[in-house]
Image (spheres, helix red, strand yellow):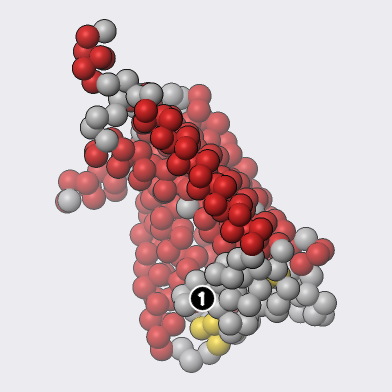
Amino acid sequence: MTTTLRRAAHWHRPMMVSVAAMAVLAVVSAIGVLTDPRVLTGAPIWLKPFKFSVSFVLYGTTLAWMLSLLPRRSRLAERAVTVVVAMSVVEMAVIVGQVLRGTTSHFNETTPLNAALFTVMGASIGVLFTAHFVIGVVMLQRRIADRAARYAVGLGIGLSLLGMLAAVPMVLPAQEPAIEAISGAHSVGVPDGGPGLPLAGWSTTGGDLRIGHFVGLHALQALPVLALLLTRFGTRLDERTRVRLLVVAGTAYGVLTVLLTWQALRGQPLLRPDALTLAAVAALLLATATAAGVVVARRRRPELALAA
């Protein structure tokens, strides 16, 4: 364990310093959630910094690890990761700063300062998206030796870009809640700040665009974890079969991200799907299970591989 931590500390240095800082901020925010009685849009005021800092810990650690898999150093990818670090610091500075001021960071245009800070956040996210895309291109060009890891990384980066795009509807004109100086919303069909799921805060009375956004973003971790599980426990599966299963899983994951966003845009709570949503989920499950079954049935058996 100690060796692993020491190795991780030598990954992209600026990113790992940022990860450590975000971890400290997560602890501070958690203390704030427990001790600060202030509530903002129906949630503890420190909950947003807590969720964002934890997310950046996962995101940053995963990106730094992916960079360490490259067969040779890429200065372009390293610079892109440094840009990600800078943009994440900007975003967290605005979020925490607004908490300290006792107001919201997202969709807030109630004063010129609040509007300017929200604009800065939007610009930083756009730059981060571009840097993330550049990292993905480099990862595809510099082929990772392990094919399963290569596909997991490529799919994870691509699907996390899809997750970022799933947040775009939050700031479109259709999401303006007809409240003066508020320029967007997480919820669809109901005001932000209503009843929500514990911790996540996702609306239980209307649609919530954060769900598809969250699921898509965390493909960055989900696909590599699946690749690791297939390698460790799928000992009877050859490399080609593991790769094909990852492609099936990645495709299903992408469709699920789109499906969750579609459900939210229809003003439908996650836990109260209608018949159409249930039919779409059932079709996705059936198609995924069928595709995975076909891949496994056609796998190259170890004894045949040895004979060849």
Relative to 116, 19 lies left or right? left
Q: Secondary structure at mark 1?
A: loop
Q: Amino acid at mark 1?
A: Leu
Q: Is 91 drawn above or below residue 144 in the view shown? A: below
Tell me the quarter of the picture where residue 116 sits.
Answer: bottom right
Tell me the quarter of the picture where residue 94 sits.
Answer: bottom right
Q: Residue at x 47, y 37 (%)?
A: 290
Q: Is 249 drawn above or below residue 31 in the view shown? A: above
Q: For the residue carrying disc 1, how many other residues have a C-alpha within 10 Å: few (<14), some (14-19), or many (20+)?
A: few
Q: Is residue 219 visible?
A: yes
Q: Residue at x 47, y 52 (%)?
A: 218
Q: Residue at x 37, y 28 (%)?
A: 297
| Closer to us: 58 or 103 | 58
Q: Is residue 90 visible?
A: no
Quadrant location of the C terminus in the rendered image: top left
Extreme residue toward the top, this view: 308
| Residue 291, x across and y down, in percent | 47, 35
The residue under label 1 is 197
| Residue 273, x across and y down, in percent | 60, 66
| Closer to us: 274 or 47 | 274
Q: Residue at x 66, y 73 (%)?
A: 206
Relative to 215, 168 lies left or right? right
